[in-house]
Amino acid sequence: MLNRVSLQGRLTADPELRRTEKGTATASFSLAVERDFKNKSTGERGVDFINCIAWGTTAEHIARYMAKGRMAVVEGKVQTRNYTDKEGKRRYVTEILVERLYFAGDKPGEDGGGSYSYGAAAPQQFQDLGDAEDGELPF
């Protein structure tokens, strides 16, 4: 079976970092992904807002280094789940389970940038991201 997703878009808000009862980090965010085609009547491209969730150190890194408006490439899997809300209604959720996230540029209007990644198979340089000082990336 194959379940792989790659998306490029901008974060619609700062990632929300939470912890489970056992202390495992989880970060959730939404990615605005522009469609490949234009609307025939308006000439504009549509946008899809895709919910994403990350766990563990990947979640911690995303929460620390990503922010609203940042361009990112997300790699992961499509995940569906359901739950019963407080009113007793069954709710269904489809989201991307993030395995890797890559910086894909800066916020609109900023110079610089880079293509750095972190995730389950992150290179050695990302194992020490927690040691960054003054909010600067350590690379």
Image (cartoon, grey):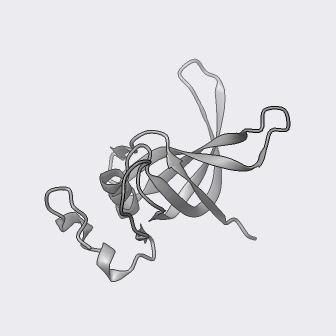
> In the rendered image, which quarter contains the C terminus?
bottom left
User: Residue, x 70% and y 65% (percent of image)?
Assistant: 3
Residue 76 relative to residue 131: left or right = right
Residue closest to the far bottom: 124
Closer to us: 132 or 42: 42
The extreme right residue here reads 40
Q: Is residue 132 left or right of residue 41?
A: left
Viewer-closest of 69 and 44:
44
Q: Quadrant of residue 51?
A: top right
Query: Residue sitting at 30 percent across and 53 percent down?
Result: 64
Which quarter of the picture shows residue 47?
top right
Q: Please name whichever residue, 12 or 118, is drawn nearer the observer in this view of the structure.
A: 12
Q: Position of residue 97 (x, y in %)?
A: 55, 56
Q: Position of residue 99 (x, y in %)?
A: 51, 65
Screen quadrant of the N terminus: bottom right
- Residue drawn where x is 62% and y is 48% of the image: 33
Residue, x 40% and y 68% (percent of image)? 114
Q: Is residue 25 left or right of residue 121?
A: left
On the image, the x and y values in percent for residue 124 come to 32, 81
Judge from the rendering whether residue 15 lies leftward or rightward of residue 129; answer left or right.
right
- Which residue is at the front of the view, 30 or 58? 30
Residue 40 coordinates in the image, percent (x, y)? 85, 38
Q: How many marks?
A: 0
Vertical placement of 45 versus 24: above or below? above
Residue extending farthest top: 87
Whether 134 is drawn above or below 31: the answer is below
